Image: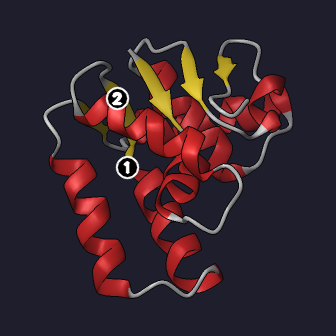
Amino acid sequence: MRGLDSNIIVYALNRDLPEHNFCKNLLERIATGEATISIPSIVFMESYYALVYAYKFNKSKVKDRLTAIIDSENVNVLEISVSTILITFEIAEEYKTGGRDSLIAASILENNIKEIYSHDRDFDKIKRIKRIDPIK
């Protein structure tokens, strides 16, 4: 099982971005059951914010698309707990990473997941996680 970062969802849902096809293909593999994925809950809020406020997508359509991902039987949504927050503090301090990336990392590590699909090189700083970039 691997984790998934927000940028993969944003690229997959935004056809105007050059990374779109790579990320759309990954989400299609997940939708068809070729892969299962764990997604920290914060990823959905980050994706919503980027698509609605940065890229000006329709709020209702974004909500529907993200809800479809959440409802997929091949997606495990990781909840944020107090222990997740405490791990987040440790990761941010140790690796000098931002709050959201640290929270995403803490969420997957707390669930014994060691790999994440992401196009964000900041995850390379976190030595306990291997970043897998689906964009060629």
Confirm whether residue 87 shows in the render.
Answer: no
The residues bearing labels 2 and 1 have C-alpha atoms spaced at a distance of: 20 Å
Q: Name the residue at 55% across, 64% down.
A: 15
The part of the image, by quadrant, that contains residue 11 is bottom right
Q: Residue 59 appears at what percent x and percent y?
A: 37, 85
User: Tag 1: residue type?
Assistant: Ser
Q: Position of residue 46 (x, y in %)?
A: 53, 62
Is disc 2 placed on a helix, strand or loop?
Answer: helix
Note whether 80 is above or below 109 in the view shown: below
Q: Quadrant of the N terminus?
A: top left
Q: Of the two numbered discs 2 and 1 on the same chain, state the one appearing first in sequence.
A: 2
Q: Is residue 7 visible?
A: yes
Q: Position of residue 71 (x, y in %)?
A: 15, 48
Which residue is pictured at 75% across the width and 38% down the height? 92
Quadrant position of the C terminus in the picture: top right
Residue 44 to residue 56: above or below? above
Q: Secondary structure at mark 1?
A: helix
Q: How is colour applied across the structure in the image? A: secondary structure
Mark 2 surroundings: few (<14), some (14-19) or many (≥20) residues within 10 A: some
Q: Which residue is mark 2?
A: 29
Nearer to us in this view, 64 or 84: 64
Can you identify the residue that label 1 sits on?
A: 41
Indicate which disc residue 58 carries. Answer: none
13 horizontally vs 61: left or right: right
Mark 1 is surrounded, within 10 Å at the Cα level, by few (under 14), some (14 to 19) or many (20 or more) other residues, namely: some
**Callout 2 amino acid:** Arg
Kindly identify the residue that appears in the image at 53 percent across and 74 percent down: 51
